[in-house]
Every structure is written in structure tokens, then in C-alpha cells.
Image: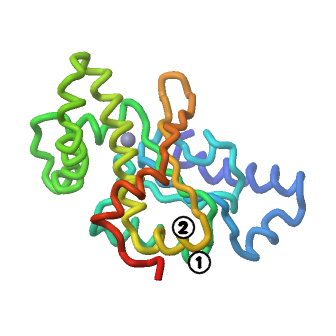
Amino acid sequence: MELYDQIFENNKKWVAKNKVSNNDFFAHLSEGQNPDILYIGCSDSRVTAEEMTGVKPGQMFVHRNIANLVPNNDNNSAAVIEYAIAHLKVQHVVVCGHYYCGGVKAAMQALDLGILNPWLRNIRDVYRLHKVELNGIKDETEKYNRLVELNVEEQCANIIKMAVWQKHFLQTGIPQVHGWVFDIHSGNLIDLNLNYHEKLKSIQEIYDLGTTL
Ligand SMILES: [Zn+2]
């Protein structure tokens, strides 16, 4: 059977399985959502947000795009972040990159990829910001991995630059911001342990939106 045809069969089994463990499973889901986490990850088919984290339906609000970006004037990610923080009141915002990311790889090459160019330029901007460190890494795989990590770090910084995050964080202490990397080679999820308090301090001079008032 083709994968496409199998999907509806899989769905029927999934419905039955969930009803066995809890007959009200779907009735409960239809009442609304109250997720603790906003997850922003890559669209890559190998990086399965819910499966690799073991979260259940209703626990994690998910946004995925090529190379897990939060670009300055991207209404799509901005709307997701605004809704998750201001309305769903998530406790944690996670940006999750992954090693062997095709988007990051493409941004490291001299390639014209049409409409992908402006999107991938966000990653080239990360490279430019960290050019000294990255050019100091001679091993290409190591450099590629490091750019994946720095890209996650800069996307977290982009969230910290947003008024909705500054306002809620400075008033309530949440949501916390986390940078993760999924290591496809081992399956492990790595917490980059970013210090977002320090990050806020370091960018506040320029990106302070006066939201403490
Ligand atoms: Zn990717």
C-alpha cells in the first residue's frame, strides 16, 4: 500500500487506540487547548516535533518552517508567537534546530535558489554576525554544526526582541526561552542552555520597546 493510502488506515487505528485508553479522549480535545510549550522547529520530515519529545495532543503549540527561522518581518511566525504568548500563555518558547539541516547547508553554498534566497539570507546574516568564530573552524562539518547552533541562538534573540515577549516576561517572568538542537545522527535532543536573561540585557540598549511601563 502507498504511504498516502495508508494514512487514513493509520488514523483509524490511532483513533481506536486513544479511545481504548480514554473514551473521552477526543471529546476532551474538542473543548480547547492549553499548551505549556511553543515549539518552533524545522519543516524537515526527520525532525518530528511531537514524536521525539513524547508530548501528547494539546500539550505543545507547534510552528515549523525551513531552518526554524523567526525573521524580522515574517507575519506567519510573528502571529504564532503573539498568539502563544499573549493568548495561550505558554510557559516556554523553544527554538529547535537540527544538525544536517538542508536549509543551513544551502545558506553555506554559492547557490541561487530563487524564492528561497531571501529566506536563507536570514541564515547568511547569522553567518555574517559570527563570521570570525565560524571562519576559525577549519573542519567543514564542525562549522556546519556550529552554524546550526548559532542560528538557533539568533532566532531565540529575535523572539527576545519582540514586544509581546518583553512585555510578558518583564511583568510575569514567563515565558522562558530555550534553544535546542536535535542531533539526527544519535536521536538526542540537546539543550543549548542559552542564558536569555543575559541575552535580554545584551540587546536591551537597542531593542528595548519600553514595555516595562
Ligand atoms: Zn532543517
* Rendered residue at 57%/39% (across/down): 1
* Rendered residue at 43%/42% (across/down): 97
Which label is found at residue 169? 2
Query: 178 and 200: which one is in front?
Result: 200
Residue 188: % across, % down: 57, 29
Query: 14 and 102: which one is in front?
Result: 102
Residue designated by label 1:
87
Query: 204 and 23: which one is in front?
Result: 204
Label 1 neighbour load within 10 Å: few <14, some 14-19, many 20+: few
Does residue 52 appear to the left or right of 120 in the view shown? right
Please name the amino acid that badge 2 sits on: Phe
| Separation of marks 1 and 2 at Cα, in angstroms | 14 Å
- Disc nearest the viewer among 1 and 2: 2
- Judged from the image, the secondary structure of the residue bearing numbered disc 2 is helix
Please name the amino acid that badge 1 sits on: His
Does residue 23 appear to the left or right of 207 in the view shown? right
Task: Note whether 52 is above or below 207 in the view shown.
Answer: above
Query: 205 and 71: which one is in front?
Result: 205
* Rendered residue at 56%/59% (across/down): 38
Label 2 neighbour load within 10 Å: few <14, some 14-19, many 20+: many
